[in-house]
């Protein structure tokens, strides 16, 4: 079944979850956690997004992030690419650090923001790492209480819902978090409800889908991906199909396969069939594209821009129909 496309709503608040590849640890030291927080700070400044809550665990990350005009996918790619490159150089490794596609759920902030922030900050309690939330140093909770200063963390949105007076707001926030200490795992914060990408009531879901004029299951077609890659690289599909072992053409075919999988357009076997190539060979080439994207920032940016242009083009064609 095809994966649903990402939803981009300017001003939308998302619950983002990222895990280490195959469950591996992504933070092996305090220095590494600090590096990730620095990248979050840079993202806030560069992309004009807002971080309402965060929690860094040894092998996964939770964020409550509010985007502006820049899509969440570009923000997360920037953060994960730069952290992976730094981490791999530090430990003399190669390959993926994070597990596949990060999860992102667009939440109805009016109904769920307070609960989401509490849920994220209580993660170390649920994991049995600490007995008191403020004992954990790698979440936004201590900054909410005024125990440390994180200027890039947008705590005012949540605290302002408790009181206009800061001392009282922090006290009421602390009580609110305390009321949730016995709260366990909440599947709605991980999978959404009516639509796996959305958490809110009927009105929120319908209004969001109407705003986007989005058909959830539709993905850009393979024809569109091939056409875009050919245009950008000034080549023809005939050249891509032609026999030969030109490395450049092989990489373009692999890029098409990579984009088709990322955008849920079709299977690798369909791409292999279109270009009369062996599935195993194409799969290996796609893996090399992924590895290159982890090591080469310019290449990763090119893939990101291609993907964004294809998605934008697909959206435009849907609206015109």
Image: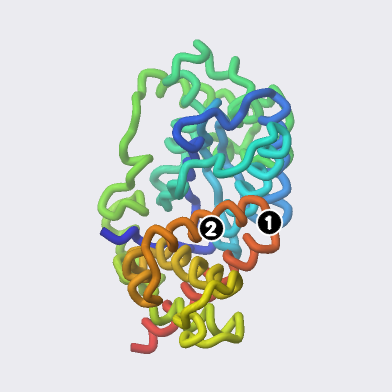
Identify which residue is drawn at 66% across, 40% down.
153
Place residue 273 in its image quadrant: bottom left
| Residue 314 higher or lower than 83, as above or below | below
Quadrant including the N terminus: bottom left
Label 1 near label 2: C-beta < 8 Å?
no
**Secondary structure type for disc 1:** loop
Identify which residue is drawn at 65% across, 63% down.
299
Question: Can you tell which mark lies on residue 73?
Answer: 2
Is tag 2's residue or tag 1's residue first in the polypeptide sequence?
2
Along the line of sight, the residue nearer the viewer: 93 or 199: 93
Quadrant including the C terminus: bottom left
**Secondary structure type for disc 2:** helix
Along the line of sight, the residue nearer the viewer: 221 or 196: 221
Tell me if 96 is positioned left or right of 222 in this view.
right
Tell me if 41 is positioned left or right of 140 in this view.
right
Disc 2/disc 1 C-alpha distance (Å): 18 Å
Identify which residue is drawn at 39% across, 45% down.
111
Furthest residue toward top = 131
Q: Position of residue 93 (x, y in %)?
A: 64, 37
């Amino acid at each position: 079944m095809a994966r649903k496309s990402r939803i981009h709503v300017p001003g939308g608040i998302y619950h983002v979850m990222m895990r280490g590849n195959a469950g591996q640890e992504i933070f092996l030291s305090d220095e590494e956690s600090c590096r990730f927080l620095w990248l979050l700070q840079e993202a806030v400044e560069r992309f004009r997004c807002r971080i309402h809550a965060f929690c860094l665990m040894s092998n996964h990350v939770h964020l409550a992030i509010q985007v502006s005009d820049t899509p969440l996918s570009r923000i997360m790619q920037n953060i994960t690419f730069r952290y992976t490159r730094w981490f791999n150089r530090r430990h003399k490794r190669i390959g993926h650090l994070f597990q596949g596609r990060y999860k992102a759920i667009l939440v109805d902030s009016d109904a769920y923001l307070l609960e989401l922030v509490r849920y994220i900050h209580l993660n170390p309690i649920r994991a049995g790492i600490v007995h008191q939330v403020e004992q954990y140093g790698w979440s936004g909770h201590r900054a909410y209480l005024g125990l440390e200063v994180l200027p890039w963390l947008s705590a005012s949105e949540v605290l302002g819902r408790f009181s206009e007076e800061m001392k009282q707001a922090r006290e009421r926030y602390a009580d609110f978090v305390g009321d949730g200490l016995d709260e366990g795992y909440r599947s709605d914060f991980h999978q959404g409800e009516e639509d796996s990408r959305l958490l809110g009531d009927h009105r929120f879901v319908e209004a969001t889908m109407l705003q986007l004029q989005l058909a959830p299951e539709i993905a850009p077609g393979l024809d569109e991906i091939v056409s875009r890659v050919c245009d950008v690289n000034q080549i023809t599909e005939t050249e891509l199909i032609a026999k030969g072992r030109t490395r450049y053409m092989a990489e373009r075919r692999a890029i098409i396969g990579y984009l088709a999988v990322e955008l849920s357009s079709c299977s690798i076997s369909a791409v292999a069939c279109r270009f009369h190539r062996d599935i195993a060979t194409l799969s290996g080439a796609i893996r090399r594209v992924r590895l290159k994207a982890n090591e080469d920032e310019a290449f990763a940016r090119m893939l990101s821009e291609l993907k964004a242009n294809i998605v934008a083009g697909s959206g435009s064609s849907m609206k015109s129909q």
